[in-house]
Image: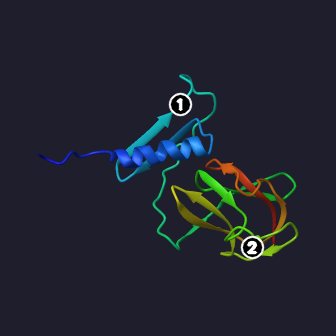
Amino acid sequence: MPEKKGLDMDILKEIIKIMKENDLSEICIEQGGLKIQVKQGYTQPTHAVYNVPIQTIPEKAHATAETQITEDSSVFISSPLVGTFYESPKPGEEPFVKVGDSVKTGQVICIIEAMKIMNEITADMDCEILEILVKNGQSVECEQPLFRVRPKA
């Protein structure tokens, strides 16, 4: 019997499981020409959907967070992907950063878990952590602000 091409049902089941575990109403993944968009519980969109291409991040690779400038010269470091925010490498260990910490460019500031892959998020500038905007274990959206920081000259 010829092999079917397209979406592996195990992957779809895993996506649905992640949606339920993280209380997500919608998820959109695009990779290698294949786009998967899963919605549940409503028929009309209730929020803006960002069309951000998802890149496969190899294990041990670093994702760089996106920044947005505010009026008081502080900036937000935002999540580059949808997932679960973790403040430390393992439960019970010290967090990567705390309020008041000085951070160097390329330093790991948190982990975003997406589809059981732990993505290290790094600072894209030297800065001081002014505020941590999410809690450990919280689900985050793509482009959601994670930290408010003050860039260093």
| Above-or-below relation of 114 to 107 | above
Query: Camera-side residue: 113 or 47?
Result: 113
Q: Percent position (x, y) of residue 55?
A: 47, 58
Q: Percent position (x, y) of residue 133?
A: 79, 54
The colouring scheme, among rainbow, by chain, secondary structure or one colour, is: rainbow
Q: Amino acid at mark 2?
A: Glu
Q: Quadrant of the C terminus?
A: bottom right
Q: Identify the residue at horizontal 38%, vertical 48% (top origin).
A: 10
Q: Identify the residue at horizontal 48%, vertical 46% (top origin).
A: 15
Name, please, the residue furthest toward the top. 43
| Above-or-below relation of 129 to 26 | below
Query: Camera-side residue: 3 or 29?
Result: 3
Residue placed under numbered mark 2 in the picture? 93
Q: Amino acid at mark 1?
A: Gln
Q: Which mark is residue 40?
A: 1
Determine whether the residue tagged by mark 2 lies in a helix, strand or loop. loop
| Separation of residues labelled 1 and 2 (CA atoms) | 36 Å
Q: Percent position (x, y) of residue 96?
A: 74, 72
Q: Earlier in the sequence, mark 1 or mark 2?
A: 1
Left or right: 33, with 146 as reference point: left
Q: Is residue 28 visible?
A: no
Determine whether the residue tagged by mark 1 lies in a helix, strand or loop. loop
Q: Mark 1 or 2, which is nearer the eye?
A: 2
Residue 84's quadrant in the figure? bottom right
Q: Percent position (x, y) of residue 124?
A: 67, 69
Query: Camera-side residue: 107 or 139?
Result: 139
Left or right: 87, with 61 as reference point: right
Query: Camera-side residue: 4 or 82?
Result: 4
Q: Which mark is residue 118?
A: none
Q: Identify the residue at horizontal 51%, vertical 33% (top origin).
A: 39
